[in-house]
Amino acid sequence: MAPRFRTRSSWLAGLLLPAVAVAQPSLPDRHLNQPGPFFLTVQFAGGIGVVAVGGGYWLANRRVEPELLVGRVPRSLGGRGMTMFTLRTTYTPFAPQLGRGNWHMSPLSVGAQATYTTGKQFFLTNRSAGRYPKGYYWWSPKVRLGAFAGLRLTYQPDYDPRGWRPGRTTLYANLSTNDLHLVSHLTNRSLRLPEILTLGLGAKAGW
Amino acid sequence: MTNVFFSWLSTRLLLGAFLTTVAASCDLLEFSPNDTHAPASERDLTQKNLAALARQPVPTRGDTLRFVFTSDSQRYYDDVPPLVASINQQRGLAMVLVGGDISDFGLAREMRWVNDEFRKLKVPYLTVVGNHDLAQNGREAYQKIFGPLNYTFTYAGTRFILVNTNGREYEFNGHVPDVPWLQQQLADTADVRRQVVMAHVPPDDGDFDAAVTPAYTRALEQAPRLVVHLTGHNDKFYVRQPVPGRVTYISGYSIEQRNYLLLTLWGRHQYKLETISY
């Protein structure tokens, strides 16, 4: 009735943590000044909606990207319609220029996210659901915690970024997982890492 | 000419590589952990297994029927391959019954992980819904991947009645399990020599709707062809007959306990119960 936890050492945490420490190479200077700190995001899949839209604010010379996204899953794909709010931060330690052109390639971005799903069936805690004895279901269906790693390609044109045209545009791909899938993976040797991953594809435009 | 051939070949190869990548990444596609997305080959598994069962001749002689009863695979993925390997060694086996809680968090992906292993069984497998399978959008995921929450089928003169008894997940609304439906199925005895009922939560459990318990047990007692009533949920094996000579209630092992039950039925009420370890 209540599965016990079997521990197993995983290299996943080990993979994500050192990446944060490799933050040495800096972005080229001309990109430090322009364009501005706001950006808009649109993402397909990745466990935060069929399509999620939102935006955020660049920090630390655009290496840190906190953002808020709103995603939607229709009834046909979700069983029941779901609206999902995701708060996440991406960390991109370096973005080397490709040749002498306007393109930059970031081989690795990592981040963490928390997703809040609306809907009566998603109770915050076992207790707030009101129909279960203490400890019946230990997880919170409403809140998912996740981690992701991905790569991105950024285009920064030479023109003056003022006006409606974005000063930089980024395309990205992320592989993510969430706490529940991770628990399944960590307690079962036969459940391989690729089986708990989810692909998200997106674009960001910054002004 | 050669150039044309090579460009055609490389286009084919590139297209092939692209399609393979797209197909592989379908498993990576998730809109929400609670979505009910599943490829066509992993949908309507109950219907597909019943069709396979209908095509399969009864593997035992006379009126004998042999099947496996296991339960609660919830997040015990490591224990499923040895179970499948052990079951595949059994002779004269017609099918495998799974007593619910296929998933732990009611997620479609979990149900698909379990099916990835169960589809390696040499015989069809049939499931009944458990309380964990109904968590959040689990009901919709279960219905899409497996099928109906209440259903019946007849094989080798035996009518199997699979009923959703997870009353707590419906806030004990007085309608789960659906007793009128159960009575109807038990009363339909055309070409039926014996009956087997399978559910997840046993009627004496706190997760069973106590308001429905008397009507439910009465319906079972009034079914003279009923051989056994099978349940999961408790991770505890027992055989009980609260009223001597009436209904036999069997609670099965969970997959994590590394045991399963092998049931052999014959005649009208005879049955043999074996515990197999793996």
Image: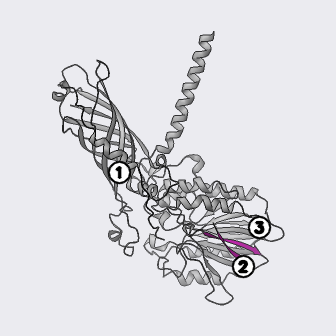
Q: Is residue B150 visible?
A: yes
Residue appearing at x 65%, y 82% in the figure: B248
The answer to which of B218 and A88 lies nearer the viewer is A88
Q: Mark 3 belongs to which subunit?
A: B
The span shown in magenta is B259-278
Residue that carries the numbered disc 1 in the rendered image: A146
Residue appearing at x 67%, y 69% in the figure: B160
Residue appearing at x 63%, y 77% in the figure: B229
Q: Amino acid at mark 1?
A: Gly
In this view, the residue farthest toward the left is A33
The answer to which of B142 and A126 lies nearer the viewer is A126
> Is residue B140 highlighted in magenta?
no
Q: CA distance from mark 1 to mark 3?
A: 49 Å
Q: Amino acid at mark 2?
A: Arg
* Disc 1 to disc 3: CB gap under 8 Å: no
Q: Amino acid at mark 3?
A: Ala
A201 over B249 or under it: above or below: above
Residue appearing at x 62%, y 62% in the figure: B83
In this view, the residue farthest toward the right is B62
B228 over A76 or under it: above or below: below
> Is residue B267 highlighted in magenta?
yes
Location of the N terminus of chain B (image quadrant): top right
A21 over B112 or under it: above or below: above
Residue that carries the numbered disc 2 in the rendered image: B225
Q: Mark 1 belongs to which subunit?
A: A
* Disc 3 to disc 2: CB gap under 8 Å: no
Q: Residues within 10 Å of mark 1 (few under 14, many from 20)?
A: some
Location of the C terminus of chain B (image quadrant): bottom right
Q: Position of residue A24 (x, y in %)?
A: 24, 35
Q: Position of residue A10 (x, y in %)?
A: 42, 52
